[in-house]
Structure formats: C-alpha cells, structure tokens
Amino acid sequence: MIIRVRQVAAACALGAALTACAAAPEAPRAARPAPSAAAVPSRPPTLAPGPAGLTPVFKNGPRTHGRTVALTFDADMTADQGPRAAAGERFDNPRLIAALRALKVPATVFMTGRWAEEYPAQARSIGRDPLFEVANHSYSHYAFTGDCYGLPRVSRDLMRADVEHAYAAFRKAGVPDARPYFRFPGGCYDREALKALTPAGVTAVQWDVVSGDAFATDADAVARQVLDGVRPGSVVVMHCTRSAAPTTERAVRTIVPELRARGYRFVKVSELIGAGGGRH
C-alpha cells in the first residue's frame, strides 16, 4: 500500500504402462494404513461475515493470548508502472526477504497482481516458502473508495474482478496457496467496498501499527515508531518495495531482535486470525 502513486498445478501427468507380468499371480499386498487426518491441510482461518453479510475486517489479534505480533509487507506495483520498471525502478526488495529468512521471521506479504507479473520468480519463491504467506493487495493498486491519497479509483462493479485478477496472477506466477485475505490499497474502504467484495469470500486485513516506512529515509525512526506502537496481537504494516521504502530492511534488523528481547513471538496473520476465533 504505497501512497502517492499516480495511477495505478503443477499438473502431474499420471500414467503407467501395464506390463506383461500382469498375467502372473500377484503377490499379496500389505494393507495400507488409513490416511492420517493430520495429512489433510486445514483451510486458513477467516472471520465470519460482518453485519448484513459484509466483508469482515481484521485489525489486530487478541491482546491476552501472549506476546505475538505479525509483520506484514505490502508488495506494491500499480497497473500503470510497467514503464517505470522497464526504466530501472525497483518495486521489489530481495534484501528484505533475505533478511526475514536469515532472522527466521514469519511474515505475511500482501502482493498486488501487477507485482507478481513483474517479479514472478520472486512471487513464486515467497509463495512456496513456509516462512511466508501471500495475501491479496488487489491487482491494480487502485483505490476502492474516493479520495484515497490521490489513487485512481476502481469502479464498484469491477472491485471483485480486480481482486480475482490478482489471484489469477498469483497462480500464473506459481504461488500455490494465496490466502483469502485482502488489504485495500491505501487502507481505504467503505461500506460499498465491503459489500462489493462479499462474494469473493475474503477477510479484509488492516493494521494497528503504522511503520512509517513509506518514503522514509531514517531507518532508526521507522524502527522506533514500530517499537513504540507494538502491543500483543499487533499487525504492523510495512512495505516490500525498494524504490519507495528503501529503509525497511535496515529497520527490520533493529525491530526483530528488540521485540524478541521483549518476549514477542512473530507470527503470520493467519495465526492471529485463528487465535481470535477465526473460522476454518
């Protein structure tokens, strides 16, 4: 969710050749054990629909379930920024992802479909790494309301399609299991936007701690803002966009050890939602 933007399976082929020994008597086979229930992956937790069936909104986890915190990173690229990327502007941040891996920090990456198109290898790598989970930040990074930091607006009748377009882009890039979580560009939403996304079955994820890393030049100031704001169950919003959030990696290298020293455990958004009674 970068503000100040102008505009915005692997199918396994199963086949086996039958052999002539099929005519020979077949040796008895040992009975196979029944598959374990644990082998079946559970669905990511989501929130129940809000009043009048509207898309539910999640801002933070329980304050009383221990010191957990979710770092979230918006991988932003708008629909019209292809020429800027072609000219050399970097909307990715491989060093940040490498730092999170080195520090063994689980995180949720809210990715735009356009970002996944521009950086498919990185999207696939993040999406297949169990340390991370990929969630939806729209395809276009256009606003879902009016007056949202100057972003152009998605019309109401195209909002659901924009979200589904992003999921299609993730699949094409090789992201196997993008989560049913959605972050509004700019964090801007209203009742009409929540109503438009109800058929998509997503939980909208906001935050309670703003890192201030967008366009920041002082990594220490970003770190202080996060450290001052975190409470048990917090969701921190940061960015995975090198050109517009150049200090994030350095800030994370300060934030992570300090929060661990304070007894915090890093989790993905899905764990916070589950801890708060989210549905599976």
Image (cartoon, rainbow, N blue to C red):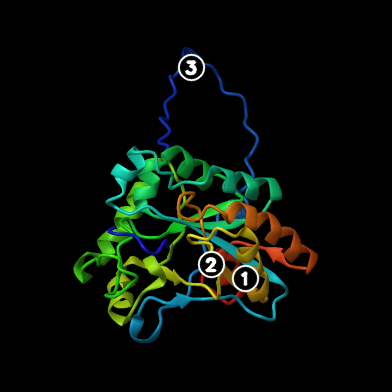
Residue 111 position, x and y percent, is 43, 54
Is residue 156 positioned above or below 104 on the image? below
Is residue 245 positioned above or below 116 on the image? below
- Packing grade of label 1 (10 A; few <14, some 14-19, many >=20) is some
Tell me what residue is drawn at x 69 percent, y 50 percent. Answer: 104
Q: Nearer the viewer, mark 2 or mark 3?
A: 2
Tell me what residue is drawn at x 64 percent, y 47 percent. Answer: 99
Residue 145 position, x and y percent, is 29, 74
Q: Is residue 56 visible?
A: yes
The numbered mark at residue 23 is: 3
- For the residue pair 204 and 258, the one nearer the viewer reads as 258
- Packing grade of label 3 (10 A; few <14, some 14-19, many >=20) is few
Of all residues shown, which one is farthest toward the front? 217
Disc 2 from disc 3: Cα separation: 72 Å
The local secondary structure at tag 1 comes to helix
Of callouts 3 and 1, the N-terminal one: 3
Q: Nearer the viewer, mark 3 or mark 1?
A: 1
Tell me what residue is drawn at x 53 percent, y 61 percent. Answer: 216
Q: What amino acid is labelled 3 in the image?
A: Ala
Disc 3 from disc 1: Cα separation: 74 Å
The local secondary structure at tag 3 comes to helix
Whether tag 1 and tag 2 are in contact, CB under 8 A, the answer is yes
Is residue 18 positioned above or below 98 on the image? above
Tag 1 residue: 225
In screen coordinates, is 165 left or right of 186?
A: left
Q: Is residue 184 visible?
A: no
Tag 2 residue: 212
Q: What amino acid is labelled 2 in the image?
A: Gly
Is residue 16 positioned above or below 51 on the image? above
